[in-house]
Image: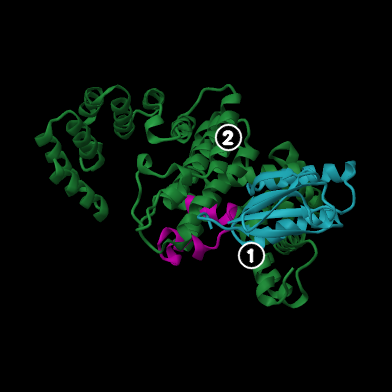
Chain colours: A cyan, B green
Amino acid sequence: MRFLMTMNGGGRPADEQLYAAMGRFVEELTQAGVLLATGGLSMTGTHMSASGGRVTMTDGPYAEAKETIVSFALLDVRTKEEAVELSRRFWAIVKDGEGDIRQVLGPEG
Amino acid sequence: MPSGPDAARASIEAVWRLESARIVGALTRLVRDVGLAEELAQDALVVALQEWPVNGVPPNPAGWLMTTARHRAIDRLRREDRLAVKIAEIGRSAEDDQRTHGAADFDAVLDDDALLKDDVLRLIFVACHPVLSTEARIALTLRVVGGLTTDEIARAFVVPEATVAQRIVRAKRTLADKRIAFEIPPPAERAARLASVLEVIYLIFNEGYTATAGSDWLRPELTHEALRLGRVLAELAPDEPEVHGLVALMEIQSSRNAARVGPDGAPVPLLEQNRGRWDGLLIRRGYAALLRAEALGKPVGPYVLQAAIAACHARARTAADTDWAAIAALYGSLARLTPTPVVELNRAVAVAMAYGPERGLEIVDAVAADPALRDYHLLPTVRGDLLARLGRTDDARAEFERAAALTRNERERAVLQSRAAAL
């Protein structure tokens, strides 16, 4: 099962200590064989919207950091609970902020 | 986190599966017996199953399980007054074992991440020890390294639970009786021991990958489990090209999962698969693993070669784009390392695609008399295919009919019969 774990912006700014802790966490996920991909997202981007086929593009930056995904990890786990547990460990490191875990639907299940 | 007894139970299972290898590994380091270590870890699991649904999931569930298991180990050693004995035994092993002297140092041992990594690697080597039968190695690995229950293993392999339970009990007893050391194998044994580990992982993978029968809901889980074991091993033993080769092979083979079965459930041959449905993420992970293997600059083994062949297929955007000359050359290398008739048969197919059916037929005919291929339906299938391409219709028809009689797969038989009839 694949889960996309995302973190929204607006949390406490990352310092060196957090970066190091995060590095160790990524290492832990890799060692556990569950991390498929991970990355951070730029706070500037282009917002796309379509209405009746009319496409509108609005250049960022995004106003609502708290609603904007700033980083993600794609997890390959056996159950939803494993994804939840790994996410719990992530947030125990980050301490403040918010994000989601959502199953990636597809033929892999 | 969701609450309630069911949620707690699900959390326990999740934490167990994530942590059991580290817990059992660390405990084995203390008590020097995989069987006993696993029992103690299971005891901790039982306590969790009793307490968590009532008191809630602790803030650090993994740490809780490890601590509880450690206390069980200390109690057990004290109760049986074996601590002194164990320390004496430990005293004569490797130097890092000095850190296990006495209960006071248990914390240090169990919290040291580098040691825990080594413990898991040792555990994998022990579970896959060649002194055990293949079935025992598979069952024990899934149990103590993968954290699967006996029932899950039984269902995945479509055998009674009692059979799996017995395999695990016997395996643990054999390891204890033969006094198999809990260690990274010394250099002289390393290659053979590693080969045994890789074999176990690939057998688990193939059991899931080629399953066509049985209660199949758990079988894709086996493929996933093997891939995960491989990925874990790649981080524990990063200097072994064959480990990365096996991971690359499994990643690339897994990338085809969605395309391997048609809407009617029939298997779709590689060259007829819709390549748009191949999983690009897994293919890239496979390439990355293959590059890691090659970057080590050591001689390549059979898994690296098979992964390289799989990568050739993955790279081709259409079946017609396949670089058959490269694949034929890789099969040539593989045949030199593992000269089996099945490899030769595969090489024949690649050579025929690259250089024409006559060349392929020469290779097929050279191995056709091999007793190992006597009842192997792919021999007449391949031969029939090559003969048909050479215009030798009557010979081809006879081969397809022979192949149809040999195969045990109904669907395949129908295909072969229609090919014979169409000639």
Task: Report if residue B353 lies within the magenta region.
Answer: no
Sort mark 2 into few (<14), some (14-19) or many (20+) by Cα contacts within 10 Å.
many
Task: Please say whether residue B66 is visible from this viewpoint.
Answer: no
Q: Which residues are magenta?
A: B138-163
Give the percent coordinates (x, y) of residue B368. Answer: 20, 32
Give the percent coordinates (x, y) of residue B236. Answer: 64, 39
Quarter of the image with the C terminus of chain A in it: bottom right
Residue at position x 39%, y 52% from top?
Answer: B261
Task: Name the front one of labels 2 and 1.
Answer: 2
Amino acid identity at mark 1: Glu
Total number of numbered labels?
2
- Magenta stretch, main secondary structure class: helix
In which quadrant of the rendered view does residue B3 lie? bottom right
Task: Please say whether residue B213 is visible from this viewpoint.
Answer: yes
Q: Chain of mark 1?
A: B
Task: Report if residue B155 lies within the magenta region.
Answer: yes
Amino acid identity at mark 2: Ala
Give the percent coordinates (x, y) of residue A102. Answer: 66, 59
**Which of the two residues, B259 or B338, is positioned nearer the viewer here?**
B259
Quick one: SS at disc 2?
Answer: helix
Do marks 2 and 1 share a subunit? yes
Residue that mark 1 sits on: B13
Residue that mark 2 sits on: B289
**Which of the two residues, B254 or B271, is positioned nearer the viewer here?**
B271
Sort mark 1 into few (<14), some (14-19) or many (20+) by Cα contacts within 10 Å.
many
